[in-house]
Image (spheres, helix red, strand yellow):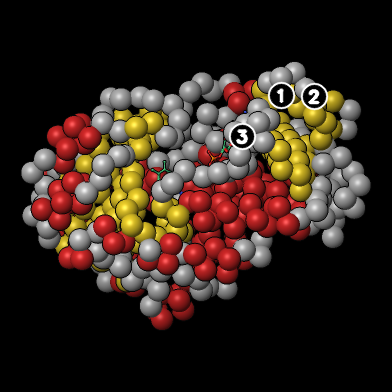
Amino acid sequence: MAGSGTEQPFVIAGGGIGGLAAAVALARKGFAVRVLEQSSEFREVGAGIQLGPNIFRALDKLGLRNAVLADAWQPGALEMRDALDGHLVTRMPLNTDVFATRFGEPYAVTHRADIHGSILKAARDSNLISLETSRRVVDFEERGGGVGVTLDDGERVQGRALLGADGLWSRIRERILGDGAPRVSGHIAYRAVLRRADVPEDLWRPDVVLWAGPKTHLVHYPLRRGELFNLVAVFHSDRYEEGWNAEGDIGELMRCFQGQRPEVMRLLDKIETWRMWVLCDREPVKTWVRGRVALMGDAAHPMLQYLAQGAAMAVEDAVRIADEVERRPDDLAAAFAAYQDARYLRTGRVQLMARVYGEFYHARGVTAELRDRMLGARTPEQAYDGMAWLYGEAA
Ligand SMILES: Cc1cc2nc3c(=O)[nH]c(=O)nc-3n(C[C@H](O)[C@H](O)[C@H](O)COP(=O)(O)OP(=O)(O)OC[C@H]3O[C@@H](n4cnc5c(N)ncnc54)[C@H](O)[C@@H]3O)c2cc1C
């Protein structure tokens, strides 16, 4: 173990999936950590999340692979259908023997609260991690051999280093980069979770199914060992509301999906209340670090969700940070710089490719025709080749 546990703790601003994963990763190397979360409790919003093989490789390093898999659902395929005429655009088999041999880890879908809960439990079980709620970080200053962190009530917290895991609207990023608000994509996601019993039998599918329409798409998949069913409807809109939990306007949603396949319209009709997200991202940068302060997760590289990789990138960040800190415990500025150098091209590629996938999902006319030809012509092996840069190969 690299840390003696007696030095000042690492301070982490934000207790989402990224911040908690970093806390667990550092504690596993023997370092003490304080997680400061602005909310009154550690929690995730009620929605699903897809987990590619790469996140399981990272979770395995935290000892959390099996705990996360235990609550998850392993779909049989990623399927894309045209939302207007229903034709199959492409189907990538998942969790087959060939998939397992290629990537060495499964593809799963889970409830955000379940993956967050597994990481939170590991953090609670560690006597090196202090979890603190209603603690909003507003500023920091490097001083002496550490970092002084200021909270919104004026209290000062001293740490050996600070990780900004404070998400899309990161305060720490504002202080390091000052690059203003995130880019509003003009896409909005509405989400809802149904009990399996409330999904008409002929509409329930074991796979991740994406209905691609002009300027819209609907994704659905089972959650929590198949007991729940997750729906995410995305469309173009000028609406802007900060946060992850505003209530959606059903009238606007129905207008955008009007005329689509009965399967789509019947599923949308089942939902009484939608929560909404305004989707934002940023251009990739490589200035996430200032001395002993580093950004991670959405604070460093916020991305659109079209590759379903934001949480995976945050957990990969966490693992890498802990590895670099273990290598250079006495030079944390160098450790953080090494972490950034190892990560910015990979995360930047996901940020940019996610935009491309968004264009594909919402295409119409000739672009949709081209998409159908490009994606539809692939064999499963070619589809796996296309994802290997992201999912990684079996060791
Ligand atoms: C519609 C949608 C679908 C998605 N689907 C997927 C998917 O399928 N797969 C996937 O891997 N990713 C997906 N993502 C992305 C994923 O949700 C995020 O990338 C991931 O949650 C980022 O984690 P994080 O810990 O970096 O940030 P967050 O989850 O935003 O956590 C930040 C935390 O910091 C706290 N905080 C903020 N400011 C402060 C402060 N000043 N002081 C203290 N605490 C603070 C917040 O309260 C919060 O708890 C999706 C995103 C969206 C919007």
Number of on-image labels: 3
Does the closest atom of ligand 1 sit within 8 Å of the Cβ of label 1? yes
> Does the residue at mark 1 contact the one at mark 2 (Cβ under 8 Å)?
yes
Amino acid at dot 1: Leu
Question: Which residue bears the numbered disc 1?
Answer: 151
The residue at 45%/58% (across/down) is: 110
What distance separates the C-alpha of mark 3 from that of mark 1? 14 Å
Q: Earlier in the sequence, mark 3 or mark 2?
A: 3
On residue 60, which mark appears? none
Quick one: SS at disc 3? loop
Residue 282 percent location from the top left of the image: 46, 33
Q: Is residue 213 above or below residue 395?
A: above
Q: Earlier in the sequence, mark 1 or mark 2?
A: 1
Q: Residue furthest bottom?
A: 97
Question: Which residue bears the numbered disc 3?
Answer: 40
Residue 273 percent location from the top left of the image: 30, 39
Q: Earlier in the sequence, mark 3 or mark 1?
A: 3
On residue 156, which mark appears? 2
Q: Nearer the viewer, mark 3 or mark 2?
A: 3
